[in-house]
Image (spheres, helix red, strand yellow):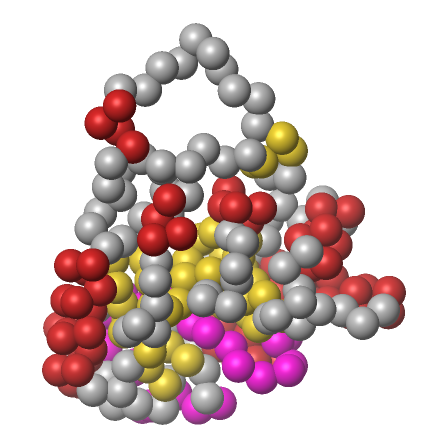
Amino acid sequence: MRFAPLIPSSFDPEPWLSLAPVMLRWDGSLHAGWSPAVRRGLAIHAVHLVGEAPVEEGLAVLHQGLGLDFLVIPVRRPDNREAGFRLLGALESLLEATSGRGVKLALRLEAGAEVAVPELLRQAHGEAVGFCWHPGIHDAEPLADRLWCGVCEPATDLRPLQALGYRWDMALTAEDPALFRAQAALLEAAHPAVLFPAQRPATALGRPVVPDDSLVFGKHWDRS
């Protein structure tokens, strides 16, 4: 698991260049220094939206040409069918906008949305959309096959997530490079790299996993 700083998009990138890849929290503006930074090859792994207008904000981010891998969208539980249709319409618009750009959509599910939104995506055959883990998700197993990125705090216990085999990038909210280095070092020491999941997933792409009795793992493969 690699820890990456999550910083406001209005921050000057200069102090963060040695810490690439970085992740940006979109605050409505982009520091002018990001354009030359992007030209120097700084890797911007993800941009996290924070507002309630995902299409407008997403298009504004894509217009910057940052070369991001993931666009992370906060999503609350739809209160009714109309809200569900609005969410699906917004995701469809963003999928069209990201087509051919190599950018994937990852939903950051707010409390209460962990069941309703994945079910809505299943009904709409929305397999192209994934999820961003955060400490508010208490049961990550149903999302494990489409957890594409994550965000945590310095005191977050990542062991339940590691048990599912998650080994990708994890954003750590940061405002000072030196403090980020110290916090990331502690997290890396507490959560060593995972090679194989300790807990076999029960579902994949919304379908039950059928164990293959002919496949046998060595006992040491479950150790992180």
Quick check: is 67 in the magenta stretch?
no
Q: Position of residue 209 (x, y in %)?
A: 57, 28
Q: Position of residue 77 (x, y in %)?
A: 71, 69
Q: Is residue 40 visible?
A: no
Residue located at (20% from left, 59% from top): 190
Give the camera-side residue of 90 and 144: 144
**Image quadrant where residue 185 sits:** bottom left
Residue located at (64% from left, 33% from top): 207
Give the camera-side residue of 156 and 176: 156
Give the camera-side residue of 10 and 181: 181
Give the magenta range. Answer: 28-55
Give the camera-side residue of 165 and 122: 165
Q: Position of residue 99 (x, y in %)?
A: 56, 55
Residue located at (72% from left, 51% from top): 119
Q: From what the image shows, is residue 117 above or below residue 213? A: below
Horizontal placement of 93 versus 2: left or right? right
Q: From what the image shows, is residue 147 above or below residue 85? A: above
Q: Is residue 207 visible?
A: yes
Horizontal placement of 61 versus 88: left or right? left
Q: How many marks?
A: 0
Residue placed furthest toward the right: 81
